[in-house]
Amino acid sequence: METKNGRNFWDLIHENKTIQYSLIAIIILIIIAFLFFLSKGYSISTNGISPPQKIVDSIYLKKDSLSILHNSKNLISQIENEKFDSILKLQWAVIFIVVFSSIISILFNAINNSKPKKNIYVGATTKKVEVFEHIFKMFNKFTLYDREQSQDLLTEIQSLVKYTIDNGLYIDTQLTNLTNDFTDYFKEIIVDYRRKDFNKEQEFQKRFQRLFN
């Protein structure tokens, strides 16, 4: 599934915590429902969900018993218990459906909110690209600083922070989060240069590419 700005569903999952948590909740609910059915003696096969054998047996028992002992108190008690058990299961099923539907609704809202919104201001798109390119260039510049240039790197980070504040109208949430993440990373490097991680910097590069595409 691809969104209008070229990002696919997996990119949205990677960038949006709400989508991540919603998917996790859906998986957990499915597992809970599966375990619930198994705990009640149901079996799941290619033919569908089969009820516990004791329920099947009780159906035949009822037929035989009713033809012989119409007034059996034990049979009546058994039927009442099964009715109560069915009502309880129905209540759990309703609760499951309501919770599951709510999570699905949250998931779709999060996906829709992740889609880019149209900007009515003339030239806004061009300015956004300009700001994006500047931040990307600054990131690449930061990667080239070495241990002896820590003070210069700190000065550049402060300059970038001011730039993002001044151009906040053209920076969306995803780019803001990315900028905060990589500036925090470089601040850690200033404190301890041993934290410099080439693989982590490559991941930042990929996040820039996903946002731009």
Image: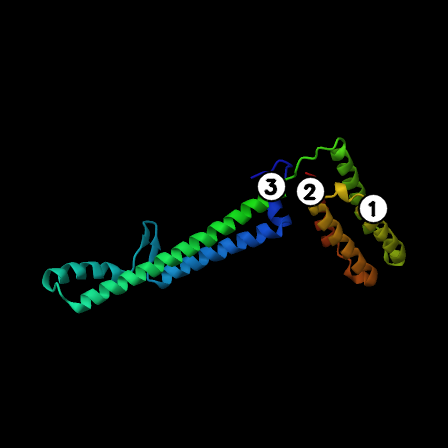
Q: Amino acid at mark 1?
A: Tyr
Q: Which mark is residue 7?
A: none
How far, Cα to Cα, is label 3 from label 2?
A: 11 Å
Can you identify the residue that label 1 sits on? 163
Mark 2: give few (<14), some (14-19) or many (20+) Cα within 10 Å. some
Coordinates of residue 125 in the picture (x, y in percent): 74, 34
Relative horizontal placement of residue 175, taking residue 162 as reference (left or right):
left
The residue at the point 62 percent across, 43 percent down is 114
Mark in the foreground, 1 or 2 = 1
Q: Secondary structure at mark 2?
A: helix
The numbered mark, 1 or 2, whose residue comes first in the sequence reads: 1
Coordinates of residue 4 in the picture (x, y in percent): 62, 35
Relative horizontal placement of residue 16, taking residue 41 as reference (left or right):
right
Q: Which mark is residue 211?
A: 2
Relative horizontal placement of residue 151, taking residue 183 as reference (left or right):
right
Q: Quadrant of residue 131?
A: top right
How far, Cα to Cα, is label 1 from label 3?
A: 29 Å
Q: Which mark is residue 8?
A: 3
